[in-house]
Image (cartoon, rainbow, N blue to C red):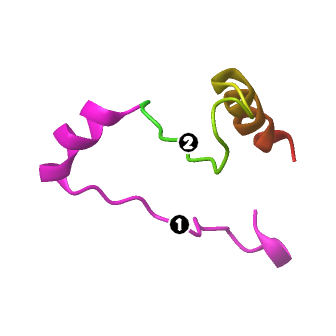
Amino acid sequence: MGVGGRASRPLLAETYREERLPEEEAIHGWYLLEVHLWPPEVSPGAVLTHYERLAEV
């Protein structure tokens, strides 16, 4: 039930453009993490760890 005892409905709806699915599937799971530091300042592992911890905020 939603607010006030009324039935709730989804706030967002997903739509798919069928012609884009193969392109999206090809890059699924690939991410580019852009940082403004040079490699001597930070390791790739540290960048990844920082990115993964963003979900904890």
On screen, 24 above or below 17? above
At 69% from the left and 25% from the top, the residue drawn is 43
Observer-nearest residue: 5 or 42? 42
At 85% from the left and 40% from the top, the residue drawn is 56
Q: Is residue 15 magenta?
A: yes
Task: Tell me if 7 is positioned left or right of 28 in this view.
Answer: right
Which residue in the structure is indicated by mark 1? 12
What mark, if any, has residue 33 been given in the picture? 2
Label 1 sits on what residue type? Answer: Leu
Q: Is residue 12 magenta?
A: yes
At 81% from the left and 74% from the top, the residue drawn is 3
Task: Tell me if 3 is positioned left or right of 44 in this view.
Answer: right
What mark, if any, has residue 2 been given in the picture? none
Range drawn in magenta: 1-28
Label 2 sits on what residue type? Answer: Leu
On screen, 29 above or below 33? above
Near mark 2 (Cα within 10 A), the count class, few <14, some 14-19 or many ≥20, is few
Question: Which of marks 2 and 1 precedes in the sequence?
Answer: 1
Query: Which residue extends farthest bottom?
Result: 4
Observer-nearest residue: 28 or 17? 28
Task: Tell me if 13 is positioned left or right of 41 in this view.
Answer: left
